[in-house]
Amino acid sequence: MSPSIEILKAVLNDPESQNSRLVPAKAWLESQKMNIRTGLVRYMGNLPVIERAQLTNWFETHVALGNKNLRLQWFGRLPIAHACTLFIVAHLRTGRWTRATFKNETEMLDYAWKIQTEDPPLEKVFHNIDVDKECLERLEEEMFERSALAGSAGNFQWGLDVGHHQEGWNPYDGTPIDWNHEDRESSEGEHEVCCQRFTLIIVHARATVRP
């Protein structure tokens, strides 16, 4: 939530100047003909009580800067409602709650607001989280992604040290398309079986070592 602090300060101090397309709670208040500073927003996305308390405490500490006199300006109103929207967005970005994809920030905000205003509990809206599976997926992406960060090691190198796998098994079959970042140029030499070359290097090294 740290990247959202300045945005939330602006919503708290000057809500009139905020773009309603980027602050769904403000758009909702306007559609209800309610004052954007005093209107109550009851939607909190059915977050658990503990998370609501944590979000409220975080808002007062980092956005209101501990000023208790400001509570009437944000508690139950637009600023904390938008904080809740951004909290949901933060989870959407990590893919922890849904596999939905978004074209832009506005679309993601609209989806977060939709979740925030729905009645079913969050666990019914979002897919169940399997921590072990999530960790395994991230490990596999690290191992099989094709990117500048991975370098030549990410260019279908599995098995090239010993030749083809049994029955032509390809470890890269079924890997997601977005694991190929297309941000580096490769060469045909990277796809050559290299175990013999390594053997020659080792033999040559041994032959040149002085007693």
Image (tube, helix red, strand yellow):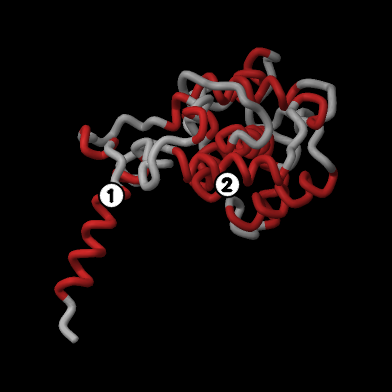
Specify the amino acid type for callout 1: Gln
* Residue denoted by label 1: 196
Specify the amino acid type for callout 2: Met
Could you tell me which residue is drawn at 77 percent across and 33 percent down? 128
The tag earlier along the polypeptide, 1 or 2, is: 2
Question: Mark 2: few, some, or many residues within 10 Å (few <14, many ≥20)?
Answer: some
Whether the residues at callouts 1 and 2 have beta carbons within 8 Å, the answer is no
Q: Is residue 79 visible?
A: no
Helix, strand or loop under label 2: loop
Give the alpha-carbon distance from disc 1 to disc 2, as whole Å.
53 Å
Seen from the viewer's position, the closer of residues 139 and 163 is 163
Could you tell me which residue is drawn at 70 percent across and 14 percent down? 32
* Residue denoted by label 2: 1
Question: Mark 1: few, some, or many residues within 10 Å (few <14, many ≥20)?
Answer: few
Seen from the viewer's position, the closer of residues 84 and 9 is 84
In the image, taking residue 87 as reference, residue 147 lies left or right, namely left
In the image, residue 100 lies at what x, y percent? 60, 22
Could you tell me which residue is drawn at 64 percent across and 32 percent down? 85
Q: Is residue 190 above or below residue 65?
A: above
In the image, taking residue 59 as reference, residue 54 lies left or right, namely right
Q: Is residue 128 above or below residue 209?
A: above
Q: Is residue 2 visible?
A: yes
In the image, residue 39 lies at what x, y percent? 71, 28
The mark found on residue 18 in the picture is: none
